[in-house]
Image: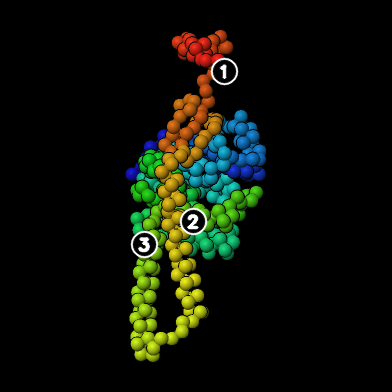
Amino acid sequence: MARSDNYKVALIVPVYNEEETIATFVEVVERKLEPIIDHVEIVFIDDGSKDQSVAIIEGLMATNPRLCLIRLSRNFGKEAAMTAAIDLCDADAIVPIDVDLQDPPELVLDFVRIWQEEGVDTVYGVRADRSSDSDTKRMTSGGFYYVFNKLSSKVKIPANVGDFRLIDRKVIMTVRNLNESNRFMKGLYAWPGFSAKGVPYVRPERAAGTTKWNYWKLWNFALDGIFSFSSLPLRIWSYIGAGIGVLALIYMCYIVLETLVNGVSVPGYASTMCVVLFLGSIQLISIGVLGEYLGRMSEEVKKRPVYVVSTIKGPLSNRLLEGYQHASSGIYFNQEPPRPASEPRPAPDAAASTAADTETTNRPSPK
């Protein structure tokens, strides 16, 4: 089903200390997407950058009306930054894209064509060649996709697919209603279903700068994905406990029979230590798995906002409600309306002032 030609696509671009790449990114996007540039809006989400990223974006906004800036009050993480953009953007489709240009902007033309002409609701990029990544990263990434899809029975994510994709408005509206605190966006994008299609591409090197991810962050990110979309790890340890119980019963029967036949033998220190250490490690691992789920349940029960937006600038700001507002998964502060110089500030309530004076008058003096 073909869609209307009157559409708007928002590129949502998380930024964290990326001062080296922002100007190049904007220049490349405007050049590569020139055929549809009038339908494109670029929304930067600053995730608490400490460098000159915000200043560079604001400088570009002075001459480019397509740029918007959502600035988070601190570093909440990439998943929270993308959640803020999904909640606040009002486009017909959004495209999460990295500012380092490892997601080729020209591929957005294919995304939009498939979305428009074929009526596909989600068009995602498939990394057909990851030679720019290290061998370790390729191996661990492939292992994660395999394990996730094996453990998750209801939500499957395609292998070698990141956040780079076009998402239709109906999917966006569905994702906005998924309010969990532990955000694994690849899984949240896949959860609503709807039609989807992959477009292969070769992932290039970073245009500039260095990645802000390390293997510890990636490990925790993988755990968030697995524990957020599967309860199988809990069930696995039930099976492991049952299996160890069966083995223990068999060994107990063996000991009883040996005692009846050969009499009582002196137990060995080595075998005792092996059994104690093995069972102790199994118990600690199972407690750790329980702790992972309990920790995430604690975060969900608190219902804290996923993000806090301190300021919004650009055309997007004019389309949002002003002042302090609740969004789907967080809160934001938009620009306050200017107060006319002739308008007096509101006086304090007279009744409240009289009550306060009376309370002060009647308060007993200290002895």
Position above or below: 317 against 223: above
**Foreground pick, 128 / 96:** 96
Which residue is labeled 3 in the image? 235
Q: CA distance from mark 1 to mark 2?
A: 62 Å
Considering only order in the chain, which callout, 3 or 1, is on the residue closer to the N terminus? 3
Can the viewer see residue 153? yes
Q: Position of residue 219 (x, y in %)?
A: 52, 57
Considering only order in the chain, which callout, 2 or 3, is on the residue closer to the N terminus? 2
Which residue is labeled 1 in the image? 366
Q: Which residue appears at 47% of the width and 77% of the height?
A: 272
Considering only order in the chain, which callout, 2 or 1, is on the residue closer to the N terminus? 2
Looking at the image, residue 213 sits to the left or right of residue 331; the answer is right
Q: Residue furthest front?
A: 367
Position above or below: 310 against 254: above
Q: CA distance from mark 1 to mark 3?
A: 66 Å
Numbered disc in front, either 1 or 3? 1
Q: Position of residue 43 (x, y in %)?
A: 52, 37
- Tell me which corner region of the image, top left, top right, bottom left or bottom right, holds residue 243: bottom left
**Foreground pick, 36 / 222:** 222
Which residue is labeled 2 in the image? 222
Q: Secondary structure at mark 2?
A: helix
Q: Residues within 10 Å of mark 3 (few under 14, many from 20)?
A: few
Q: Which residue appears at 44% of the width and 65% of the height?
A: 283
Work out which quarter of the rendered image holds the C terminus and state it.
top right
Work out which quarter of the rendered image holds the N terminus and state it.
top left
Q: CA distance from mark 3 to mark 2?
A: 19 Å
- Tell me which corner region of the image, top left, top right, bottom left or bottom right, holds residue 52: top right
Q: Which residue appears at 38% of the width and 46% of the height?
A: 121
Can the viewer see residue 348? no
Name the amino acid type tagged 3. Arg
